[in-house]
Amino acid sequence: MSQDVFTGLEAQLGSPSPSQRQEAAEQLGRLGARQAIPALVDLLADPDPEVCQSAAKALAALGGREVAARLVPLLSVEQVGLRNAAINLLRQVGQHAPDLLLGLLDEDQADLRLFAVDLLGQVQVSGAARALIRALEDPEPNVRAAAATSLGKRREHLALPALIKALDDQDWVCFAAVEALAAIGDPAAVEPLIQTLARANEFLQACIAEALGVLADQRALPALVAALRRAQGPLVSLLAGAMLRLAPEREDMADLDEDLREKVLLGLVDGLKDPSPAVRAESLKGLARLGDAGAVYAVLEAARDNRDPDLVPVMCDTLVAIGAWQPLLAAAQDPDPRVAELAVMVLDRLDPVASQAALLKALAHPQPQVRGRAAMVLGHRGDHGVAAALTGLLTDPDPQVCQQALNALGRCGGSESAEPVAALLDHPEMELAEQALQVLLGLDPQVVEPLLMTGLGEIDPRKRLLCLKGLGQLDPQRHWPRLAAMLGDEDTAVRVAAVEALTRIPDPAIWERLARVLEDPSPAPRLALVKGLAGQDSPQARSLLRLVVEDPELQVRLEAVSCLGRFRDREAAPSLVALLASGPNRQRIAAARALGALRAEEANDALLELLADSDHQVRAAAVKALQQIAGGWE
């Protein structure tokens, strides 16, 4: 970067316009202008936040010791925003100045030491682990706690003895040490945590219980049981959850006496009312491990107040693990849709025979989401015997319920479902009508075909369209005379669908009828004809395509020209040469490409004339075509 450019950008940093200052900062960062570091650091205090962000981004890109050295003094400023900007940048560039970060631990100001231990937990510098271990002896408890947290973030096994010693520190420091020991995951921390659990207050007991659950060491189980016997209130659910995580199998809980088991149950049930979704989830998992049938009602009540969709599958898994299905039969009729839908979901995974009647009854639930869920469950089972009940939902006022009923009938429906499903072809929502058609196509063709044939005579063009598509997918060759008659339908979309169906039939008798499509007043059927012929390289297809070359619609002509080129139809060469003389550029380009593919030497003169065309794409197409004709170049 020249000095003039740098001087101009540096001057622009002092512009009264924020956008000018921002642009200059971004440019200096991209250009690697290290001489701009002091000015960019000053810009971190700019009153415009976007300018500050651009300066910070530029400094991060420049990096190096010089940037870090200029940021460290900003940790002492009283401006919170400027100080935070310096901290965030040091997280990115601090590794270039380890001595400066480590030196902050010797500062008299506690805040600077606090910033240092926080940074050392995130910046990889040599000597950070030992420095943080020494910081566990800092006179300021906030610094000691932050040091413990940083050692946990770094997973420093070297810090294990010092962190264990910190368990005897003030509560806040002890709390941080417990979390760090859990993060490090060394089994050597289990016994010290057990000893601390016995003398800790409720706040620390909860933290230690969580850590012991993470460490998952069986040695902690007796201590958790003992603490649970003494615990009261919310602590019960936390200790119970940790204890259950240490029990590999449900049978491991069999040794609990009745009183303690009841206490665990009630503690976990109380945890279902906790405002924290994480605590509620852990309580649900604990109830699943405990396997007490009495918890079913508590889980169902928790569903009544639940607003977190992520907890629903956890509730479902818990109820399945408990396995008590009888209370769920009544719950499937609960007026609350959250309770009823949960019960239906669980019944799907439990006793299929015992739950059948309850699921059929849920099809009449006043809430649509329950009716839809019950239909989904019954469909999954694929039981043909429920088809009649599902058919009744096809007239449900809620479209989503209709959709679920259709999906279910697609799995378990029979010929008796055909007429009710066909009635949905008239549904005002096209997506539902199309779904009904797909279900019909999966039923007995002998029953479905007469329904679709009848539909071809309906007044509603949309229904004629759906029925035509259905017949085209079932057996177009058998029904081709009726499909061909639809080429004269008054609705363009219906005529297009008829063309698409007929061009899939390899029967020479159909070609005469298809030729009439070229006289259709709308370009859409003619375009559909060309696209259909594109997959049939036959004399009849080529003959029709040569006629389409003269179609009045450009897009139709382009499709035909492209097909003739791919088919290497030499008889089309005169018509293609004629297209080179005039018309839109796209037409001349397409014709040139097709003639090149044909290697039509009779096109040379016309192609040579295109070399003087004003459009470079036309010229390029002509050059390529001439090369192909001359040397067979592809």
Image (cartoon, helix red, strand yellow):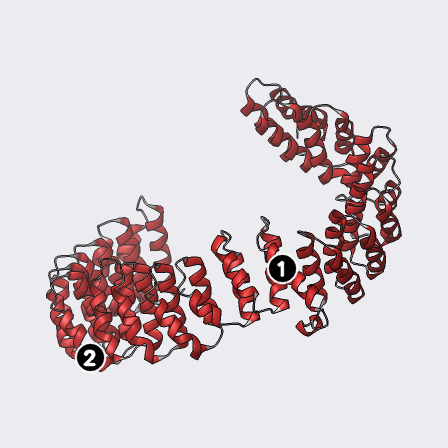
521 shown above or below 110: below
Give the image quarter of residue 128. top right
Q: Which quadrant of the figure contains the C terminus?
A: bottom left
Badge 2 crowding class, 10 Å Cα cut-off, few under 14, some 14 to 19, many 20 or more, is few
- Looking at the rendered structure, the kind of residue marked 2 is Asp
Q: Residue 507 has which mark?
A: 2
Give the image quarter of residue 44. top right
Badge 1 crowding class, 10 Å Cα cut-off, few under 14, some 14 to 19, many 20 or more, is some
Q: Residue 468 has which mark?
A: none
Q: Which quadrant of the figure contains the N terminus?
A: top right
Secondary element at tag 1: helix
- x, y percentage for residue 409? 32, 73
Residue beneath disc 1 = 266
Q: Name the residue located 20 percent from the left edge and 72 percent from the top edge.
A: 502
Please state if 397 lies on the left or on the right of 173 as rendered: left
Please state if 200 lies on the left or on the right of 549 as rendered: right
Q: For the image shown, how many numbered marks are present on the structure?
A: 2
Secondary element at tag 2: loop
- x, y percentage for residue 4? 64, 23
Please state if 433 lies on the left or on the right of 253 as rendered: left
Asked if residue 535 shows in the view, the reply is: no
- x, y percentage for residue 400? 33, 60
Please state if 337 lies on the left or on the right of 136 as rendered: left
Residue 65 vs residue 579, the one in the foreground: 65
Residue 565 vs residue 209, the one in the foreground: 209
Q: Name the residue located 82 percent from the left edge and 52 percent from the top edge.
A: 156
Q: Name the residue located 41 percent from the left edge and 58 percent from the top edge.
A: 337
- Looking at the rendered structure, the kind of residue marked 1 is Leu
